[in-house]
Amino acid sequence: YDGDMFADWKGNAFIGGLSSQALIRVSFETQPTDNLGQPPKDGQTEPVAKEAERFEWGKRIREVEQGPDGALYVLEDKEGGRLIRLTPAE
């Protein structure tokens, strides 16, 4: 996410869960590690992704996209699935 509407989520990614029926926010961090999880001797860093938040939806999510306005658009799966525009609460 690189929009301004959800400033705290900048740099995060969103995954729509078909089987989990959830919208999942993934954050990225850089932490020093080697392939055994130990601090490396050469000071290199590894990017690490982690589940930051899970929003239970109750329906299969087919797609999540950021709109040009910074809102998140969620498309539900199957016939009758909705296209929902997410914006911050006022």
Image (cartoon, rainbow, N blue to C red):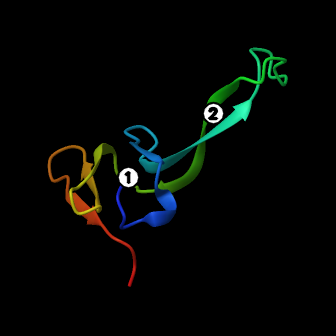
- Seen in the picture, residue 89 relative to 75 is either above or below; the reply is below
Viewer-side residue, 52 vs 84: 52
Look at the picture and state if 2 lies above or below 20: below
Q: Position of residue 61 (x, y in %)?
A: 32, 46
Is 25 displayed left or right of 88 in the figure? right
| Residue lying furthest front | 42
Amino acid bearing label 1: Asp
Residue, disc 2:
48
Q: Are marks 1 and 2 in contact (CB under 8 Å)?
A: no
Distance Cα–Cα, label 1 vs label 2: 18 Å
Q: Residue at x 23, y 55 (%)?
A: 67
Q: Residue at horizontal 84%, vertical 18%?
A: 41
Q: Estimate the x, y position of residue 70 in percent, counting from the top left.
A: 29, 61
- Name the residue tied to disc 1: 2
Circle 1: is it few (<14), some (14-19), or many (20+) Cα within 10 Å? few
**Is 37 placed above or below 23 here?**
above
Q: Amino acid under label 2?
A: Val
The residue located at (41%, 41%) in the rendering is 17
- x%, y% of residue 53? 56, 54
Give the residue displayed 80% in from the left and 16% down from the top.
36
